[in-house]
Image: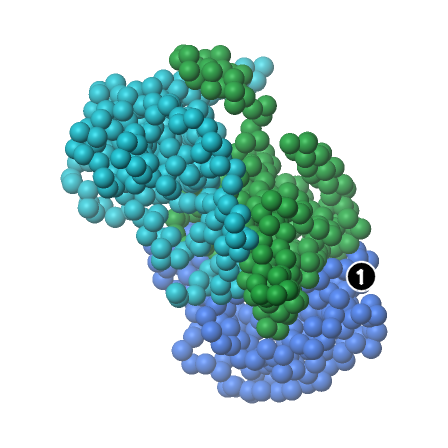
Chain colours: A green, B cyan, C blue
């Protein structure tokens, strides 16, 4: 991208700007410096961006030693004509709930880790997942973007001053989050009640008679089996989906590790 | 504030960590600190602009514009389609241009923008109106009677001059969608730092914009040499200073124009190449 | 015509029992079909309207447009309810022969009366009985079964709220009546693949009991009136 840009720009000063700002790939869109962690995920044409902002709040009364994770999926009118502008519709809300369930079921982050002072102060991780280009399989892409963004969250260290009882934030000293599990979602579209297609596009989803999403973690345990209605499946077919999801988990995990490693030496 | 039932809610209240930063520590270090130390920048300097058109698969036209300071705007355009309510608002015989300007909750520095809150909705409505004002003169709306064209902009990161970037991105997206236009609307922002001797600066970054006492965004149709929008305000500038600012801004627009045109040409070439490849694949 | 009966059911296998079920159909006069379904202390009221005239934007040219509204016991519906509405709608769509009523609207309203565990399966059962009471054409029936895996790994069918909280994982299935296939599945917590399959088998076995209950309930209703 950058090389093409460099060669065709007609004005001298743009050339100079570009030489200084040369970027190797399209990754710049994924790194949002105003967020504490971010990731851009593309599955085919489907593009999803996840930005995480960390804020401080008092823990809830009934869980004094826990922080909060607040995931929200947005499907703005920008990503497809099928969505209208305005507050999130049914599909966006169902996707938000699915992501919230994945976080809760997999225990990918122990909410206790987000607590700074018992009953007084805890982190709130606002995970905003926005679809930029909707071409099906939004659940897989959202779960993937969330995991990748959480992987590069850097939280400033917070200490409680013993004398004053006030908290102090050291913005210079940053620590990564502890990710305990790596849940990966794999979706299938069911065709004609029998045929299964992995990672469906929007067109395939529209034609399909149902979808299944399987979420597995590192130990091949099931974090979620999500089949919201649609064509009935036998237990054996469901098993088939799970087996394929476990295989895909390993590939996706490898990809995440590779990407995380590539951005570390900054 | 009424509770939002359509989003997963967090705690009632939360504060950004910057608020709790130890006293004495500069709340926002980094670019700002460097800015102070560095020699005052050339006011005529434009920040690097990266533009790419036709990158979304679902939208009829799309564009992405990034400014050197970190501003990232994605834009999609659709049109023309049948107007939802016939004859509403628009004068007979012309089409309507519907603009939307969303801001990602994580786009700003500091506290997260709460989507759906009254203040956020107000800010988005204002930005959408400004966008529409700047774009309408560029589009040949008379060619689309009783139809509507839609432009949707999403601000992913605000690094200053966001509206100007959105105007450029939106007109690129419209052109990419094949909408008939007189010209591209090119946006350029300026701001003036406090102090009597401070000069106007082109394409300010987010810290500069925050400190500024006066801000101005202009949109120009360069080929026609017509101004489509002037939006600004602030204190402590003489009329002459505003005239000078306007001139500087329009000059900036002229200089940005070739970059946008090139990105559009590249998008068209890319599309031709894929179409040709598809055609040869089909015949083979 | 309204009638109520209660029946204690013992599901086969593992000694796990379903709580006492009870169902009353046609208890509301305004909707086209209605049903109240009780599982232990959990109860859901279903009201069904349609096929009726459809609003312009929701009209589907090839089938009936189904809308499901889930009302919680207190407060306004939130994201959880919206996601369950989607699940319930797509489950009903899978069995409803909507193609027989194109360009119409079918609305199913589910009002939670009390939640004492296994709420989603109770909603599914109430929805199916509601569809049945409205006399809409269905390709098959379905029933909802919730299974909880307690900390020892034993399967508890139709758990109470307490049992759900103690459980490692809670799985809810919708099973169809013709081939005992899985229409819907959703899980809370994590479990191994084998455990999931064991729960599914238990749910399929429990489905037989529930379908027998459906049959008895409907037979009793029609033999009286």
Foreground residue among C57 and C79: C79
Residue B55 position, x and y percent, is: 48, 29
Q: Residue at x 66, y 44 (%)?
A: A151
Q: Residue at x 74, y 52 (%)?
A: A180
Residue B229 position, x and y percent, is: 23, 33
Decide if residue C190 is on the left or right side of residue C152: left
Decide if residue A249 is on the left or right side of residue C51: right
Decide if residue A172 is on the left or right side of residue B14: right
- The subunit carrying tag 1 is C
Q: Is residue A136 above or below residue A17?
A: below
Q: Is residue A177 above or below residue B141?
A: below
Label 1 secondary element: helix
Residue C89 position, x and y percent, is: 53, 61
Residue B255 position, x and y percent, is: 33, 19
Q: Residue at x 43, y 26 (%)?
A: B39
Q: Residue at x 60, y 50 (%)?
A: A170
Foreground residue among A145 and B177: A145
Q: How many marks?
A: 1
In this orientation, does residue C220 appear? Answer: yes
Q: How busy is the neighbourhood of tag 1: few (under 14 within 10 Å), some, or many (20 plus)?
A: some
Foreground residue among A95 and A124: A124
Q: Is residue C36 above or below residue B25?
A: below
In this orientation, does residue C134 appear? Answer: no
Q: Which residue is mark 1?
A: C195
């Amino acid at each position: 991208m950058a090389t093409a840009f460099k060669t065709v720009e007609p004005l001298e000063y743009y050339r100079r700007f570009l030489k200084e700002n040369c970027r190797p790939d399209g990754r710049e869109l994924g790194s949002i410096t105003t967020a504490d962690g971010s990731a851009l995920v593309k599955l085919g044409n489907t593009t999803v961006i996840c930005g995480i902002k960390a804020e401080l709040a008092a823990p809830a009364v009934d869980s004094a030693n826990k922080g909060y994770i607040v995931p929200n999926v947005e499907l703005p009118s920008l990503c497809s004509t099928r969505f209208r502008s305005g507050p999130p519709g049914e599909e966006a809300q169902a996707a938000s709930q699915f992501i919230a369930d994945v976080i809760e079921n997999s225990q990918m982050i122990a909410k206790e880790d987000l607590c700074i002072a018992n009953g007084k102060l805890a982190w709130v991780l606002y995970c905003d997942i926005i679809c930029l280009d909707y071409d099906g399989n939004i659940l897989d892409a959202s779960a993937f973007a969330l995991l990748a963004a959480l992987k590069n969250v850097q939280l400033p260290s917070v200490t409680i001053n013993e004398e004053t009882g006030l908290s102090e934030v050291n913005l210079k000293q940053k620590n990564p989050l502890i990710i305990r599990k790596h849940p990966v979602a794999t979706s299938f579209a069911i065709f004609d009640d029998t045929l299964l297609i992995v990672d469906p596009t929007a067109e395939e989803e529209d034609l399909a008679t149902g979808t299944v999403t399987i979420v597995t973690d590192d130990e091949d345990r099931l974090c979620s089996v999500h089949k919201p209605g649609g064509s009935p499946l036998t237990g054996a077919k469901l098993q088939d989906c799970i087996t394929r999801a476990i295989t895909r988990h390993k590939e996706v995990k490898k990809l995440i590790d590779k990407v995380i490693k590539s951005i570390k030496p900054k | 504030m009424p509770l939002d039932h359509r989003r997963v809610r967090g705690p009632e209240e939360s504060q950004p960590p910057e608020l709790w930063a130890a006293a004495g520590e500069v709340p926002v270090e980094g670019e700002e600190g460097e800015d102070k130390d560095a020699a005052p920048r050339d006011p005529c300097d434009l920040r690097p602009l990266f533009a790419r058109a036709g990158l979304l698969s679902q939208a009829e036209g799309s564009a992405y514009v990034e400014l050197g300071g970190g501003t990232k705007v994605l834009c999609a355009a659709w049109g023309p389609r049948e107007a939802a309510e016939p004859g509403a608002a628009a004068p007979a015989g012309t089409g309507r241009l519907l603009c939307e300007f969303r801001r990602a909750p994580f786009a700003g520095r500091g506290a997260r923008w709460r989507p759906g809150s009254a203040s956020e909705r107000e800010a988005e409505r204002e930005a959408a109106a400004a966008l529409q004002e700047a774009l309408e003169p560029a589009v040949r709306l008379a060619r689309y009677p009783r139809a509507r064209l839609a432009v949707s902009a999403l601000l992913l990161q605000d690094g200053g001059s966001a509206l100007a970037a959105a105007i450029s991105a939106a007109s690129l997206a419209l052109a990419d969608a094949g909408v008939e236009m007189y010209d591209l609307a090119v946006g350029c922002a300026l701001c003036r730092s406090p102090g009597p001797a401070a000069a106007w600066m082109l394409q300010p970054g987010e810290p500069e914009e925050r400190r500024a006492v006066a801000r101005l965004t202009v949109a120009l149709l360069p080929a026609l040499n017509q101004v489509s929008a002037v939006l600004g305000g602030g204190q402590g500038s003489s009329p002459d200073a505003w005239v000078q600012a306007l001139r500087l801004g329009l000059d900036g627009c002229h200089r940005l124009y070739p970059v946008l045109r090139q990105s559009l040409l590249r998008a068209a070439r890319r599309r031709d190449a894929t179409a040709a490849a598809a055609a040869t694949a089909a015949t083979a | 015509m309204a009638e109520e009966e209660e029946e204690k059911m013992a599901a086969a296998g593992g000694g796990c029992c379903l709580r006492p079920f009870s169902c009353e159909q046609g208890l509301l006069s305004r909707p086209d079909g209605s049903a109240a379904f009780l599982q232990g202390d959990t109860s859901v009221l279903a009201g069904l309207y349609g096929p009726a005239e459809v609003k312009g934007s929701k009209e589907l040219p090839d089938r009936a447009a189904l809308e499901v509204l889930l009302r919680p016991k207190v407060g306004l519906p939130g994201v959880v309810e919206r996601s369950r509405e989607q699940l319930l709608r797509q489950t009903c769509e899978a069995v409803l022969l909507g193609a027989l009523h194109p360009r119409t609207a079918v609305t199913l309203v589910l009002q939670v009366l009390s939640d004492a565990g296994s709420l989603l399966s109770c909603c599914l059962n109430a929805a199916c009985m509601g569809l049945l009471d409205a006399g809409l054409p269905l390709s098959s029936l379905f029933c909802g079964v919730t299974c909880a895996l307690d900390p020892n790994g034993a399967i508890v069918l139709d758990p109470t709220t307490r049992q759900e909280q103690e459980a490692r994982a809670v799985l809810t299935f919708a099973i169809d009546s013709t081939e005992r296939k899985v229409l819907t599945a959703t899980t809370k917590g994590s479990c191994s693949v084998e455990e999931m399959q064991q729960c599914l088998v238990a749910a399929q076995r429990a489905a037989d009991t529930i379908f027998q209950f459906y049959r008895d309930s409907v037979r009793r209703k029609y033999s009286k009136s």
